[in-house]
């Protein structure tokens, strides 16, 4: 065929399969959101509409891609987690990352008006996101990744809350506030908030302090079962992965169908301690749980 | 700091810098556009609105990313080309691909209503795109890549035009039409179109036959200059790349500013022969040309 | 400095760090050993001298590189295993693979005359080896890799033993023997050996049936301890890896020193069942055991 | 078959094909040669036997692997160059690097006694080499790589010659010599050599000043041909590579046979200027030249 003369260029495409039996995290970040949040007048230190829009887009990505186990978002970033047994797109790096990024972008743009009805999008300032995939070899490290993001959420939010309170309520200029906060620890910031402004940081909204966890809702498990094997498994590394037993396509399709039946929920809770994971064993096991009776 | 306990997870991020001094092509593809085009009732074999929307989004991506030299689109795919000297995002693969994909998606969704005013987007059927980057070591191979896509455009369009004419005007069912076309060559299809339906394929719209080329417009060069060095350079491989002379950040910024001044145009012309490239030497040289006098 | 003009070429070197916290297996294979074994008249189906030379070289590689946990060899191939916590050469792929391959080659060539005193090496037929690194995310999969190689050893050796007995003792030509063995299962081959040649395959040497396991010798552990946590740990995935606690350089050096004190031994035993690993927990834990009293 | 249960572990092997149509340089380096050269009492600043042994091993690697175009060595390092059209081992990175490293090591060890007859190898101090592959997208950059190594040779050799002359003839201790040379330029070192020791650096042996170039010998081309196309081609980037025309296996075999007929020679000449390459066009074109009449 006439085309064959040029088809050799396909040989330059290089495979990018992610290592099997590892957790895949696709983290996306808003591009130039600093400038963008000024342009669309996001509220400081947190704009509830912006976070709700992020979460709404994340929920839709979870609906689009039933292979996803969980997602976690703070500010203009979101981490989407695929299970070690995931075979979506044969685990091709580019395909997984771009699909998540594009699906997220599409929903974000499409729902913008529902959250920012008074500030319609301008073509020169369209929000967009970049992303990357990282693989983690076992569950402990995946848990540590999630903890890392939630600790970051806390650190950033405490700083931002203090900084913007000093500026907006305290009348300081940005430079002075920044200068005063340099080198302070958490206790210092808590004190500034409380002593100067009567603000108890603990009373701030959970969505700001904890970020947003997105997952499929099944019946919660008893947190203190007599038989503790589930807890053991969750903590023990890659135990939930049965190596070598790659699910067939029809099995994968069946699992996807089951997962689609679960409602995707948004929570603002601690994901560093074991409890969250122990009560929702389906997240790490990837075995769909029991649907709640009255959903 | 409290965070450090978990920060080790960053060590799992692996670098993905694309080889320096090579052409980078980011090709994006519509996800599930077969089903999508049915749902939104795209016209067959070509829906002009859908192509115009693709092109509008591509033009905006070129505006967003002045580092791009040229783009080429057919159907629901688009190839975006970065020059070998490009240092955008330090040539990180994921960053380049996701930025192109996300920017394209954002503009596609945002402009949908301008092209499909009668069929608004439904959340369950939001268009999205995946993508990948491929690198090509010299200009000849980049040219061959572009030729490959344009030959593909021709082959697909001739087939689709014939098939859908047989179905829509000839009243055949899909299976029979497919069966009859099996094994035919171009001449056969041209004859079917002409003898049975009085259609001269050559008179079809250029946008369908040639696809869409998107680039920055400067003053065209004389196609037959006495001094032929430009032609030589274009054909000679990586001649336009000066190895080792990585442009400084300020030089890059200056070039970006210059490129932003040029208007991005959409053309439907032959990009296989030399003429297109000879008359627009800035595309392969990456040196901004002379702005047209009355733009 | 004068050199800087060309030094940009260093930017083409791409990083090749292997994912942290994963097992690294470097498998090397003899290049063209089929031809080579004819040239140097290796005995069929197994040449004890050739295997002993392979093992001697492997022992020296283990001595050279105390970071290695274990090695396993069959025929002209050898697998060398680095622990998930290994930081040797910053886990650079090329560096690890080439070091193992080169060290192995050096010892193989250097000791050739001790094993093949009657057939000195000819420059045109020097033995050499290629190799590659593969990473495995947890201990279960590493164990499965080791099992895979030992099952392969069994399958190949039973075939080769039967084939060469049919040819050398049975007087068949190669083609006929090959033809008769096509489609046979293990039981068939055992029967051919026993009924026609009075050979009980079980009585073959362990080195031929089981391959060679090379590791550092410490005091064996009680196979049935009351406290069974060690067994659990070994089977539970990546439990022996403490993520995030990357050993410091001085800790690494100390561990290397400790490991150098252990004698490297060659065994021909089952490594598929748990017993081998349970009694030698130091192999998977990477914590040096107790040196035997009278070594 | 019994094996299949474990065979899934093969899925963890990841492809490592080097980008087509690029130059491949495999550079190998002696491991721990500083210590080794003390142990075997290499002469300072250059040990002719050690360099001759390196060159002898490199010649044998060129003989083993007819796909190699050229090699260049200084001190304990050697760079081996494969042509952009090379399809050896399907361009698999690990396979190419380890084969070069292992073949080189084998010959180095095997020929040791011919060059160091008075200092036989000790098992605890066996020389070995590590290596890595780097790809370069066009001929200009490959030439710059070669120039980089030769400039390095010059810089190092001038330094070492001066340093060791100050120590061995001048009676300085190492620290004082090092201290005095800190910050000096080439002219300073030339002056030290000449004024203090009566040594004209230009009269040093070419093998020390220029390093060693290893290639296949054909009839040299006229350096100033009337028809200059060869010169143009050599300078023009990837001109010698015909993209898309991947040679068939039988063509590759034929070329290998032709190349085997040429004698591999060792030269100590300038490879930075064009002349070397212009007179030996077969090195960059990969088309075997005309065999010299009286070889």
Image (spheres, coloured by chain):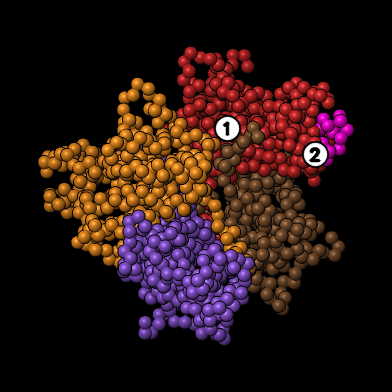
Chain colours: A brown, B red, C purple, D orange
**Prevailing SS of the magenta stretch:** helix
Label 2: which residue?
B179
The residue lying at 36 percent from left, 74 percent from top is C261
Q: Quadrant of residue D288?
A: top left
The residue lying at 62 percent from left, 36 percent from top is A4
Residue B144 circle label: 1
Front residue of C159/C274: it is C159
Q: Quadrant of the C terminus of chain C?
A: bottom left
Is C200 located above or below residue C127 in the figure?
below
Residue B118 circle label: none
Q: Is residue A171 magenta?
A: no
Residue B144 lies left or right of residue B128; in this view the side is left
Residue range corresponding to the magenta coloring: B164-178
Q: What element does badge 2 sit on?
A: helix
Give the mark nearest the N terminus, 1 or 2.
Answer: 1
Q: Position of residue C5 (x, y in %)?
A: 36, 35
Front residue of C69/B258: it is C69
Look at the numbered discs 1 and 2 and tell me whether their residues touch, using CB distance below 8 Å. Answer: no
Label 1 Cα neighbours within 10 Å, binned few <14 / some 14-19 / many ≥20: many
């Amino acid at each position: 065929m006439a085309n064959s003369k040029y088809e050799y260029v396909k040989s330059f495409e290089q495979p990018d399969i992610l290592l099997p039996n590892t957790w895949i995290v696709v983290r996306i970040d808003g591009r130039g959101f600093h400038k963008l949040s000024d342009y669309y007048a996001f509220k400081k230190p947190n704009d509830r509409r912006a976070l709700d829009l992020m979460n709404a887009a994340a929920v839709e990505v979870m609906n689009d891609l039933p292979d996803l186990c969980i997602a976690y978002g703070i500010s203009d970033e979101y981490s989407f987690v695929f299970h070690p047994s995931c075979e979506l797109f044969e685990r091709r790096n580019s395909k997984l990352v771009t699909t998540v990024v594009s699906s997220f972008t599409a929903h974000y743009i499409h729902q913008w008006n529902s959250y920012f009805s008074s500030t319609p999008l301008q073509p020169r300032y369209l929000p967009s996101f970049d992303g990357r995939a990282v693989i983690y070899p076992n569950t402990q490290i995946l848990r540590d990744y999630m903890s890392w993001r939630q600790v970051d959420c806390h650190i950033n939010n405490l700083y931002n809350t203090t900084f913007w309170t000093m500026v907006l309520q305290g009348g300081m200029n940005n430079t002075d506030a920044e200068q005063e906060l340099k080198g302070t620890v958490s206790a210092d910031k808590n004190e500034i908030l409380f002593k100067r402004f009567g603000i108890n940081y603990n009373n701030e909204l959970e969505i700001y302090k904890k970020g947003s966890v997105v997952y499929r809702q099944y019946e919660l498990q008893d947190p203190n079962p007599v038989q503790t094997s589930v807890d053991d498994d969750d903590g023990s590394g890659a135990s939930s992965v049965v190596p070598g037993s790659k699910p067939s396509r029809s099995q994968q399709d069946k699992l996807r169908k089951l997962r689609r039946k679960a409602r995707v929920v948004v929570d603002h809770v601690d994901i560093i301690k074991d409890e969250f994971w122990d009560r929702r064993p389906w997240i790490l096991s990837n075995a769909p749980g029991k649907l709640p009776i009255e959903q």
